[in-house]
Image (tube, rainbow, N blue to C red):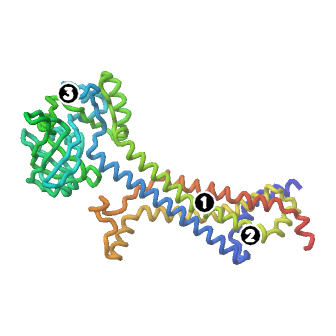
């Protein structure tokens, strides 16, 4: 008897597979099983594609914004750094530091005629700035080197220039939160600057960022040879937090050391949170498909009551009956998950080509670069995301099979075979 029971238990998965692909099932049960598998396919594929697109957007955002944002900053708690050349050389000699550049930053109001716009005015040294950021390669009109010298010139973001309706050669009025004492009273400090260049990175800084020379910034903001801080570029973007932490230990406590994950952290945390929320919403689609398996198995148990009773009289244990129907449900889910994962990987890998084909078919541009800052859907397919989706789907499917399998194991063979 023990041998018979072990044999039934060993063959439980095979019986479950046979039930899954049996042609003798009720037609309605077959329809429900097919719908469950299709729901699993769509849910898994959609989740993989959306995660790849979210990764692509996050990478695109990180690349564009961090092309202007340095890897790290060093500032003083005392309000400005007077002996910044000495500090610059000290920081440049630290391990992992590639380049260092001074800066002065202040909020300002830029105007042209009746149009006014708030902006961030940043004073930099053009040659040093090119070593810590990609600003020079983002210039679309004019030249960053035009900021060199004592001329009162400014380089604007393309969107900001469009709002102010200015082009290189025009002038803008800059008002900063500094007061000028005159016989008539106190007035905000303002200066007329000539636009000598435009830059564009395809992100939010295009709409509020403006650059002037370091000497112009010191005159306009009254810094008197001081700078607000030093921008730092590390050997690797993702090593910046560790490198800047080590640098902080080498500098006096009067200096504040930050890295890009602190200055831009809220933005990327918001993107990460959005990815998690979208994933949970799409995972609910997979959950619905998984729990449709409950309906399929309940009907399958009702159909196989006689088979279950026969197996129990042959010595099958309740655990063996449960294993049969757990295997039955997991096979149905496994087919849907496998097809969905393959379909999702193919779609995520070729999403740009698919988008282009749809645009050509419809004769329209789905993603206007002037509106969305992108011309196509970015996608970054990561193996960890695919594995996580597949694992979560299998877990939900396993949970969905437990109740029907328990119902099957609870069937009393004597009650079923009484009228046979």
Q: Quick one: label 2 or label 1, which is nearer the N terminus?
A: 1
Please indicate whether residue 18 sits to the left or right of residue 306 in the image: left
Which quadrant of the figure has residue 407?
bottom right
Residue 307 horizontal side relative to residue 139, left or right: right
Quadrant (top left, top right, bottom left, bottom right) of the N terminus? bottom right
Element assignment for label 1: helix
| Mark sitting earlier along the chain (1/3) | 3
User: Residue tagged by mark 2?
Assistant: 299
Q: Earlier in the sequence, mark 3 or mark 2?
A: 3
The dot on residue 254 is none
| Residue pictured at 85% horizontal, 55% vertical | 3
Number of numbered callouts drawn: 3
Residue 358 lies, with reference to residue 103, above or below; the image says below
Q: Which mark identifies residue 287?
A: 1
Q: State the separation of the CA atoms marked 2 and 1.
A: 19 Å
Image coordinates of residue 39 in percent, x first then y, are 58, 67
Q: Relative to 119, is 303 above or below?
A: below
In this rendering, would 96 be left or right of 109?
right
Could you say which is closer to the camera, residue 367 or residue 371? Answer: 371
- Which residue in the protein does label 3 denote? 84
Q: Mark 2, residues whose alpha carbon is within 10 Å: few (<14), some, or many (≥20)?
A: some
């Amino acid at each position: 008897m023990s041998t018979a029971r072990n044999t039934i238990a060993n063959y439980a998965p095979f019986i479950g597979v046979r039930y899954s692909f049996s042609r003798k099932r009720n037609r309605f049960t077959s329809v429900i099983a097919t719908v469950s598998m299709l729901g699993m396919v769509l849910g898994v594929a959609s989740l993989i594609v959306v995660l790849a697109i979210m990764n692509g957007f996050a990478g695109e955002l990180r690349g564009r914004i961090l092309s202007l944002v340095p890897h790290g900053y060093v500032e003083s708690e005392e309000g400005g750094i007077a002996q910044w050349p000495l500090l610059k050389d000290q920081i440049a000699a630290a391990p992992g530091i590639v380049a260092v550049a001074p800066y002065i930053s202040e909020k300002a109001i830029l105007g042209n005629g009746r149009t006014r716009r708030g902006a961030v005015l940043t004073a930099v040294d053009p040659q040093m700035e090119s070593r810590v950021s990609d600003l020079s390669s983002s210039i679309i009109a004019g030249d960053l080197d035009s900021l060199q010298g004592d001329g009162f010139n400014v380089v604007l973001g393309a969107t900001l220039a469009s709002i102010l309706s200015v082009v290189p050669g025009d002038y803008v009025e800059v008002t900063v939160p500094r007061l000028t004492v005159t016989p008539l009273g106190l007035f905000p400090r303002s200066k007329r600057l000539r636009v000598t260049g435009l830059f564009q990175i395809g992100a939010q800084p295009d709409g509020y960022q403006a650059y002037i020379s370091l000497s112009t910034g010191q005159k306009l903001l009254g810094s008197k040879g001081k700078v607000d801080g030093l921008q730092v570029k590390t050997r690797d973007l993702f090593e910046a937090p560790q490198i800047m932490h080590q640098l902080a230990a080498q500098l006096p406590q009067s200096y504040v050391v930050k890295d890009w994950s602190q200055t831009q952290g809220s933005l990327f945390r918001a993107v990460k949170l959005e990815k998690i929320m979208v994933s949970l919403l799409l995972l609910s689609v997979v959950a619905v498909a998984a729990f449709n398996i409950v309906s399929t198995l309940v009907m399958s148990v009702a159909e196989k009551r006689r088979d279950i009773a026969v197996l129990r009289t042959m010595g099958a244990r309740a655990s063996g009956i449960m294993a049969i129907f757990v295997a039955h449900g997991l096979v149905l889910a496994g087919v849907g998950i496998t097809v969905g994962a393959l379909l999702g990987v193919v779609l995520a890998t070729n999403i740009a080509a698919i988008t282009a084909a749809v645009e050509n078919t419809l004769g329209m541009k789905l993603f206007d670069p002037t509106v969305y800052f992108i011309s196509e859907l970015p996608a970054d397919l990561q193996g960890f995301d695919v594995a996580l989706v597949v694992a979560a789907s299998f877990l939900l499917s396993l949970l969905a099979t437990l109740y029907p399998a328990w119902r099957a194991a609870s069937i009393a063979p004597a009650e079923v075979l009484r009228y046979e």
